[in-house]
Image (spheres, helix red, strand yellow):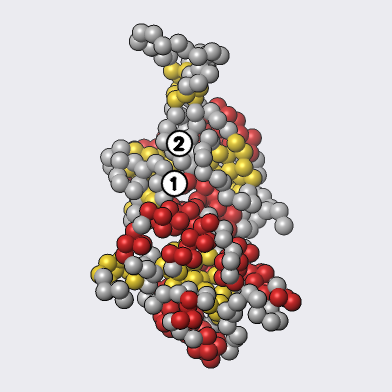
Amino acid sequence: MAFVGLGVTGGIGAYKAVELTRLLQKRGHRVQVAMTRTARRFVGPLTFEAITREPVITTQFASGLNTGIEHIALASGVDVLVVAPATANIIGKFAGGIADDFLSSLYLATRAPVLLAPAMNTHMWEHAAVQANVATLRRRGVRFVDPGDGYLACGWVGAGRLADPDVIAAAVERVLAGTARTLAGRRVLVTAGPTLEDLDAVRFIGNRSSGRMGMAVAAEAAARGADVVLVLGPTSVDPPAGITVIRVRSAAEMHAAVMAALPGTDAVIMAAAVADYTPAAGPSPTKIEKGGALTLHLDRTRDILADLGRTRGAKTTPVLIGFAAQTGDPVPAARRKLLEKQVDLIVANDVTEPGAGFDVETNRVTLVSREGSDALPLQAKTDVARHLLDRVEALLAASPVTAVAPQ
């Protein structure tokens, strides 16, 4: 049985939160409801109190609550925080770090996983500001049950309807299952972002990788209890909190950092977009002045994943996962890399496909192993990370524990 904190905000879908509460109780969970001021315009607190047998929290300033700092106490106690319906307003508060009521304060204080089920008008859901806030929260590890299409209370037809309570309850179960410390005692090394190969004092060869995919993997591994080391190339996206981050710039620096961190590692996930070529003579210490045609002599960089495969040899650990960003069908190249580099799994994608390339929040990948390939649908990179870590756990199941995560 889990302790579920259920936030209810001010939308017509608030009535569905009553059914969601019942479904969570039927699954054996204890539910504590917190309602915003506007939520109480749609459904009364007494309804939730009657079915949960718990007091409904409606303000952080109620008499008696402040003696125990209730939002801190609840934040420390819940196993998951669910908000259904989640309005555009509460999503914006969460993304902006605003804490002006009990629920927004609870969100900032909790370290439990958070699941939001948005519900709003179609145009509101599609608005750039709302989508930017959703993207920000996804990067921070917040999970979403996306709204469904259908007839809305405002009379419009489109995306924005609160997902059905049974769909949300099933998502809660998946979150609770994923919060088990299934990688406790394991050490996971992840690479993310691009590498930049300097040409001179101002120019470099690089790529458009944002590092979001690798950082989603690092965050998911940490959530499962792993001791995570993230080797991160230059990126403007902030890495997850609570993990060891090693900053690098060039392919050579990333190679050295990975090899130095390798001892005691159970799994290496090479999500970084490492440059294949670097200037043969190294960078010019001064700016190369503009002139006629410029000829560059480039050398191949060391293949980190292939070196990892050779280092491991016939052993089964560490588990080795590579990424293959291709144009067109990525599977043939992924199969070739799988064998050539002696690794366990290649995550392949077509970077020309809308929503699946660099610097976006979503991805469509195919997981390629010796046993075959598994094509995943277009989804948030956080969801891709969960699928990938499930595969890593399966590969580690028969492997001895080689590291102990700090307590």
- Can residue 7 be spotted in the picture? yes
Q: Report which residue position mark 2 lands on.
A: 273
Closer to us: 289 or 368: 289
Name the quadrant of the C terminus: bottom right
- Residue 380 locus on image (x, y percent): 41, 55
Give the quadrant of residue 64.
bottom right
Dot 1 falls on a residue whose secondary structure is strand
Q: Report which residue position mark 1 lands on.
A: 345
Dot 2 falls on a residue whose secondary structure is loop
Residue visible at 41% across and 75% down?
11
Closer to us: 155 or 332: 155
Task: Identify which amino acid the numbered label 1 is placed on.
Answer: Leu
User: Counting other residues with Cα less than 10 Å from the Cα at mark 2, is it few (<14), some (14-19), or many (20 or more)?
Assistant: many
- Residue 174 locus on image (x, y percent): 48, 68
Name the quadrant of the N terminus: bottom right
Task: Identify which amino acid the numbered label 2 is placed on.
Answer: Ala
**Does residue 346 appear left or right of residue 262 in this picture?**
left
Can you say whether 98 is above or below 60 in the image?
Answer: above
- Residue 99 locus on image (x, y percent): 59, 64
